[in-house]
Image: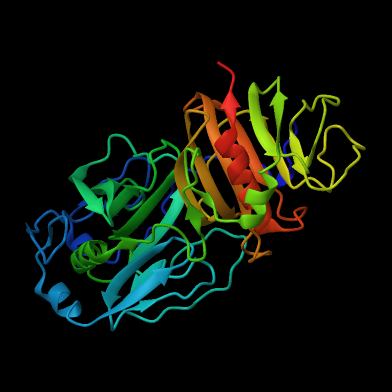
Amino acid sequence: MTVRSWLALATVAALVSSCVANPGSDAAADSPTVASQGATIDEPEPGDPSDVTYLEWEDAAFTVIVSAEADALFEDVKTCTSEEGGYTVEFPSNWHTNEGGQAPGCSWFGPEPFAHAPATLVAVRRPLNVPIQLGVLGGALGQVLEQPRLVSDQVVIGGFEGFRSEDQIQARPPWWSYTYNAWLDLAFDGLKFMASTTSAADGDYVLHKAVLDRMMATLEFASRPEGANHVAKEGYPFTVLDSADADRLFETPDTCTNPIGGYTVTFPDDWYTNTAIGETPACSWFTPDYFEVIDPAEAPDEIWISTGIVDGIIAYTGLTQIFLNEEVLVGGMQAHRAEFNHRPNDRPNYRVYHYAVTIGSPDQGPSFLASVDPDAAGDYELAKAVLDRIMASLEFDE
């Protein structure tokens, strides 16, 4: 099966810090210098920020750094909700955050006003006077090996299992990174929440860590995006979008088997699917409209839903806007149901709804992928509801 080019973006994204190395903390400035190797200048070692004490704070699920100044800041707070990330967080009322632009809303937080750069295709870099960054992204969480680590705690963030760490980053000059990570689903390469502050940002690094602790203690995640209405249906292994039209279509079902992909699905008898043509196996395309195939390697313009096997595993880039991501059971196998926009800069209202099942190695694939084409579907919401029911009926060959 040939997958449309707009699906090619769904690849594993490396988690890379977007901060520019520029130590601004007093600790870094006061630290001793050592002779650098292969250079003519000495580089300062980062100050050791480990001289802090942790204690219980309000109803937090973990301890926070003792800081009277941070406590005073949190006596008066604002609330910020990230529609893209699906989270709500409290922050000091005299601090500032972004409302969108180069990064999704509620991504950057700092005590000083900062410019809201417009969305671009270039790398996203937070200003140096913005010490705290939050976000949701896809890919496997990794760590740089052989780096000094001061903190390593298992924590629960917004109801999700995660960890808190503090590492020395071997940049030039080196700096410290204080980070929270949480797994938003069970897949190795699924969605992750990340929040961090670094000694490379301007200001008081220890205070910024204490503020980040308290922000993470207030973090809450929405169970699903506003407007999504998934309901339980008898006989289905997971919830599906509530749709009377889709239910009526499935009152008269048909079945189809893809012998190459090794799966069988149930779909509306009023809809059309394909027989084997060229290298595209039978039961790859579904639509309510009659269609003719011109190029067997390309889905015709009328195809609402495509299914098939692709090489590799499916994840998301760091700049992908995520509206929905859930773990579901498809054909007895763990799968992702997701809705996202990987083109937020040039098409802000563009959304893709898909299911991904890793049927091979967890880190190599192959994977089963089923997607709604938002450009071809005459009724995008109906197409999503039909895809839910198709996936709920899918069976893989033994």
**Count of all numbered marks drawn on residues in the image:** 0
**Residue beneath the point at 18% across and 55% down:** 32
69 displayed left or right of 272: left
- Tell me where residue 199 sits by quadrant: bottom left
The residue lying toward the viewer, choosing from 105 and 231, is 231
Left or right: residue 177 versus residue 135 is left
Does residue 202 appear in the picture of this structure? no
The image quadrant of residue 178 is: bottom left
Which quarter of the figure is the N terminus placed in? top right
Observer able to see residue 7: yes
Q: Position of residue 242 (x, y in %)?
A: 55, 56
Q: Choose between 2 and 292: the one closer to the eye.
A: 292
Residue 201 lies, with reference to residue 272, above or below; the image says below
Q: Nearer the viewer, residue 261 or 270?
A: 270
| Residue extending furthest toward the front | 251
Quick check: 287 left or right of 208? right
Would you say 74 lies left or right of 40 here? left
Instruction: Please state the horizontal and vertical placement of residue 274, each as a whole percent of the image.
Output: 81, 33
Q: Is residue 286 above or below residue 32?
A: above
Q: Quadrant of the C terminus?
A: top right
Residue 342 appears in which quarter of the rendering? bottom right
Say which residue appears at 11% left-offset and 69% top-offset. 67
**Residue 390 drawn at (x, y percent):** 62, 39
Work out whether residue 233 or residue 130 is closer to the camera in this orientation and state it: 233
For the rendered model, the colour scheme is rainbow
In percent of width and height, residue 377 lies at 75, 54
